[in-house]
Amino acid sequence: MSWEVVARKDFQDSVRSRWLQGLTVLFVVLVAGVIWVLRPGPGETVSSNQVLNSLLLKDALVTTLVPLIALVVAYNAVVGERESGSLKLLLSLPHSRADVVAGKVIGRSAAFGVAVFVGFLLPALALALGPLQFEVGSFVGFTLLTALLGAVFVAIAVGASAAVPSNTLAIGITVGLYFLFVPLWGAVQLPLQFYFQVSSPPAWLPLTGQEVIRLLRLINPTGAFKIVTNAYLGSTLFAGDGARLHVGATAMLLAWLLAPPLFGLWRFDRADL
Amino acid sequence: MAAIDIEGVTKRFGDVTAVNDLDLTVPEGEAFGFLGPNGAGKSTTINMVLDFVRPTTGTVSVLGHDAQRHSLMVRRRTGVLPEGFDVYDRLTARQHVEFAIDSKEVDDDPVALLERVGLPDAVDRKAGGFSTGMRQRLALAMALVGQPDLLILDEPSSGLDPGGAKEMREIVREEVDRGATVFFSSHILGQVEAVCDQVAILRNGELVAQDTVEGLREAAGGEARLVVTLREPSAFDVGTVLALPEVSEATLDGDTLTVACADGAKTEVIAAVEDSGVGVSDFETAEESLEELFLEYTADDGEAMEVEP
């Protein structure tokens, strides 16, 4: 398959980038740092699930940093090659533009996934020898979900990268999306949550206050990720009262994984290079 | 079937017309030179052949396939050395060629290809450290993967030293002998003259000439250029040769007399110079070079463009 060849080449290229190598080290240091902060007193142990459930790891590290880094790693995936001219080498070979976009999403997600895996597993394994009670299943699952969140933001960045003719525009769009999804979304969501505790949404909106908040969480890929991981770590994923919400959040993550690259491809396919 | 068939193609970028109503047929199995000054529309034309850009009007077909709708089919059988490309800095020469091999789903030997283009010592070096000439050779190796039916070389000699340019021409010749069509663009006539069977000359997005190299020479008038060294130049009057009916031009510079005349009139000119009593110490003849013809075709409003040697 042609996209496979592109993905393999992009993976080979990305894992050799200093950016990604530095990033892997950063993950190792940060995850180790979180575990150190949460270290138990003498004679006690702490479970890896407690680490994963901590605000520090889940909110500060994963949902704040992973989107940022994924966007940085992928914003120039297509447009960078378009500006440098290596795209001419790539497209003179028998690859369709769809193969290029798909290959970029997959190759770069895989490279990012490697950084996440090394970053999460290395410190955990080291500390498992000490006071950390290591629950392999949930830890690997959480790491996979983090890689999925990374892939979603890689997909968003590759979509932007394919859609525009210059690196500068791609940077602008990805930075804008980051601010929208991470700080801004939270800044709107929190006061709104307080507001809906005392009053209800306008009458023309056929939703209750709680539903509006839930929708806001669901639409944002980091929010959807939190819904899925919380349920996963609480062993209630796709079960109980939240089942519908979990399915919705998973579907939303998949939609974010597919829609931006498709939009990018739609523009890229029409472009004169 | 033609290797490349361009019919009535116009390409506009905004209000700039890069290519204007171009008709061009490249026959199969020969080396075809595509000439013109920088900015004449050569790369735009090649980009339309490869579906990097789409014609505003007109159709391009390559190896019998529509270049736009069946671009993948075209690129499976085409090898390309693009203009203004870049390599993947972090990947080695071998990884580049392997990428082309995997992309074309063939089973070539990357080392053999890199040896053929003169990069035997750089196989496992990262391409980021390559010179322009080495990058050019690397892209040529990628273009040769899978024995393509059509090789498109866009300004292949840029960045190559004269030795490298000669090797490039040898590879072009070998590929044509194998049965491939080579479409070779250049703004330097000398690169194309020695290797191409036919040439087309593009200027301001329009085709100004298409012929064999021989045919172009004839079109130049078949004039001979006679360079005569005189013993006593001070006693010579240029008017005596200019008076001859088949002489179009004569200039005296120091002891060197240069005469442009019909090919058959050379002996007559020499005789006339000797008759004037100034003494001929040496003479040589030359065909009017294709270079001058190329300049005539491509010069804008009588202003000669700069041509690299």
Image: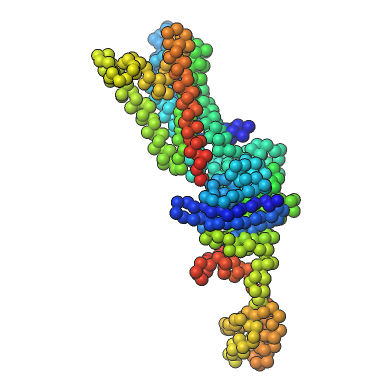
Position of A228 compared to A14: left or right?
left
Rendered-image quadrant of the C terminus of chain B: bottom right
Q: Where is residue A139? Give x, y as percent.
A: 49, 15
**Residue B76 in sight:** yes
Position of B131 compared to A242: left or right?
right
Determine whether B34 is above or below B144 in the image. below
Determine whether B217 is above or below A182 in the image. below
Residue that sits furthest to the front in the current view? A204
Position of A201 compared to B122: left or right?
left
Q: Where is residue A84? Give x, y as percent.
A: 50, 45
Query: Which of the 4 image quarters holds residue B211?
Result: bottom right
Q: Where is residue B160? Give x, y as percent.
A: 60, 55
Residue that sits furthest to the left in the current view? A198
**Residue A36 in sight:** no
Query: Which of the 4 image quarters holds residue A3?
Result: top right
| Residue name at image x 66 percent, y 88 percent | B273
Q: Where is residue B16? Give x, y as percent.
A: 46, 55
Determine whether B164 is above or below A38 in the image. below
Residue that sits furthest to the right in the current view? B178
| Residue name at image x 42 percent, y 23 percent | A221
| Residue name at image x 65 percent, y 45 percent | B65
Which of these two is toward me, A193 or B230? A193
| Residue name at image x 67 percent, y 89 percent | B272
Which of these two is toward me, B61 or A173? B61
Query: Which of the 4 image quarters holds residue A26?
Result: top left
Q: How many labels were placed on the picture? A: 0
Position of A223 compared to A269: left or right?
left
